């Protein structure tokens, strides 16, 4: 039979093979790589792909590209996945959708983009495609797709769309099962984090501010609205400037990236507050895990401390010694800083080097649980 003829028997065999590969991968009995590989083998000159993209956090959770040069795979994972013009199309769809690109979103419509010219065209001009979207949670999308030369679209479009339609049920069941498993894993992580932190306000959020759970102290803060609020299930700090830094830190932590911000301090009419952020640990998923395609989200633990409970009268810095274990020399440096002097000026007046003053300041940060000079000042002075 010619390679470009896809009659019923051939479509049936390909569909059964893809469905079996999906089921095997779902229950950890096979690799997800096998699914796009079968598609690619069935359509000569094509490459198959399977991906999971979290659009709100611009994070690629899973990627398998078959019959593609490794350099192009790496380039997609590191860069082109995040600027793929088709993302807008997939994201706009609210439910499971199957389609051929030439009919719904032709590649020629973004012919002047970097994605088209630097990544898609060099791969044998595989600009035609057929794909299926399955919704994970929120704007998270799982795609099963294949790309092929435009010259093949007249034959491949119909056959590929038909095969994807036949395996849709298998793919949806797999995503639904992974969603349930992931929810169980995330719930266990959240509960453990909050149980261990019952003495301060603590809650767990995603990178886009969604509140997953909170202890009673945090719930009280949400209701009071003095330092943090819960708006439609998302958290916001009372200080707009600090809230912007808070959002940026959440985004980085949710992507597994380092952030220079681990503590934020600000003052409201109700007092001074310190907000601490930490990414909750995630264990690497073993090969064959049922959660490989839909891995648990990275969650962030947020703790809020009311600094007013430890606030010290500006004129009575001697009380810092029992409160935080500061030495007389450290208290002397605090006093100079409270007078508005820079670290350089304070060092000169105290008769110490700038290096000694900065080292002493770092020690003060550690003892008081602050990370910046502005936070330390909030701790030392009363509300103005």
Image: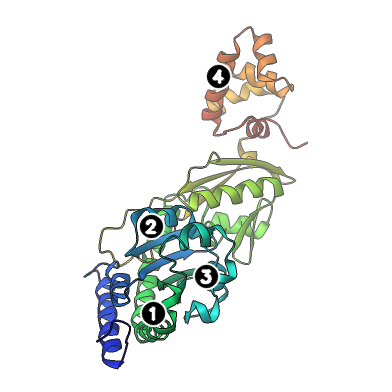
Of labels 2 and 1, the one closer to you:
2
Q: CA distance from mark 4 to mark 3?
A: 48 Å
Q: Secondary structure at mark 1?
A: helix
Marks 1/4 in contact by CB < 8 Å: the verdict is no
- Residue 38, given in percent of the width and then of the height, sits at 28, 74
Of labels 1 and 4, the one closer to you:
1
Mark 4 burial class by Cα count in 10 Å: few <14, some 14-19, many 20+: some
Marks 4/3 in contact by CB < 8 Å: the verdict is no
Could you tell me which quadrant the N terminus lies in? bottom left
- 70 or 183, nearer to the observer: 70
* Residue with the most extreme right position: 384
- Residue 330, given in percent of the width and then of the height, sits at 58, 18
Q: Which residue is mark 3?
A: 138
Q: Which residue is mark 2?
A: 73
Q: CA distance from mark 1 to mark 3?
A: 15 Å
Of labels 2 and 4, the one closer to you:
2
Res 370 → quadrant = top right
Q: Which residue is mark 4?
A: 360
Q: How is the image coloured?
A: rainbow
Marks 2/1 in contact by CB < 8 Å: the verdict is no
Which of marks 3 and 1 precedes in the sequence? 3
User: What residue do we see at 64% from left, 55% from top?
Assistant: 236
């Amino acid at each position: 039979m010619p390679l470009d003829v896809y009659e019923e028997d051939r479509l049936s065999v390909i569909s059964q093979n893809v469905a079996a590969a999906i089921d095997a991968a779902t229950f950890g009995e096979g690799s997800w790589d096998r699914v796009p590989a079968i598609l690619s083998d069935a359509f000569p000159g094509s490459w198959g792909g399977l991906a999971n993209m979290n659009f709100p956090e611009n994070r690629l959770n899973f990627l398998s590209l078959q019959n593609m040069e490794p350099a192009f795979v790496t380039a997609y994972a590191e860069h082109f996945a995040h600027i793929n013009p088709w993302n807008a199309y997939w994201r706009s769809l609210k439910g499971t959708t199957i389609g051929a690109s030439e009919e719904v979103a032709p590649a020629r419509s973004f012919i002047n983009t970097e994605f088209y010219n630097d990544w898609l065209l060099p791969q044998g001009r595989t600009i035609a495609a057929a794909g299926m979207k399955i919704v994970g949670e929120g704007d998270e999308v799982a795609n099963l797709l294949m790309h092929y030369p435009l010259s093949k679209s007249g034959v491949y479009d119909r056959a590929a769309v038909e095969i994807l339609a036949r395996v849709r049920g298998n793919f949806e069941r797999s995503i639904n099962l992974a969603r349930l498993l992931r929810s169980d894993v995330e719930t266990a992580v959240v509960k453990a984090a909050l149980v261990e932190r019952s003495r301060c306000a603590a809650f767990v959020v995603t990178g886009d501010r969604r509140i997953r759970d909170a202890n009673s102290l945090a719930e009280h803060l949400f209701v009071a609205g003095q330092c943090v609020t819960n708006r439609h299930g998302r958290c916001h700090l009372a200080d707009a400037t600090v809230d912007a830094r808070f959002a940026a830190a959440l985004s980085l932590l949710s992507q597994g990236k380092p952030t220079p911000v681990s503590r934020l301090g600000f003052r409201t009419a109700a007092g001074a507050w310190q907000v601490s952020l930490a990414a909750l640990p995630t264990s690497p998923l073993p090969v064959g895990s049922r959660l490989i395609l839909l891995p648990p989200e990275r969650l962030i633990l947020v703790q809020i401390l009311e600094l007013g409970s430890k606030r010290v009268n500006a004129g009575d810095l001697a009380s810092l010694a029992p409160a935080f274990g500061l030495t007389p020399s450290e208290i002397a440096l605090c006093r100079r800083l409270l007078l508005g002097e820079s670290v350089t000026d304070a060092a000169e007046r105290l008769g110490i080097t700038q290096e000694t003053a900065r080292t002493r300041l770092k020690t003060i940060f550690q003892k008081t649980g602050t990370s910046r000079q502005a936070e330390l000042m909030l701790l030392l002075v009363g509300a103005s």
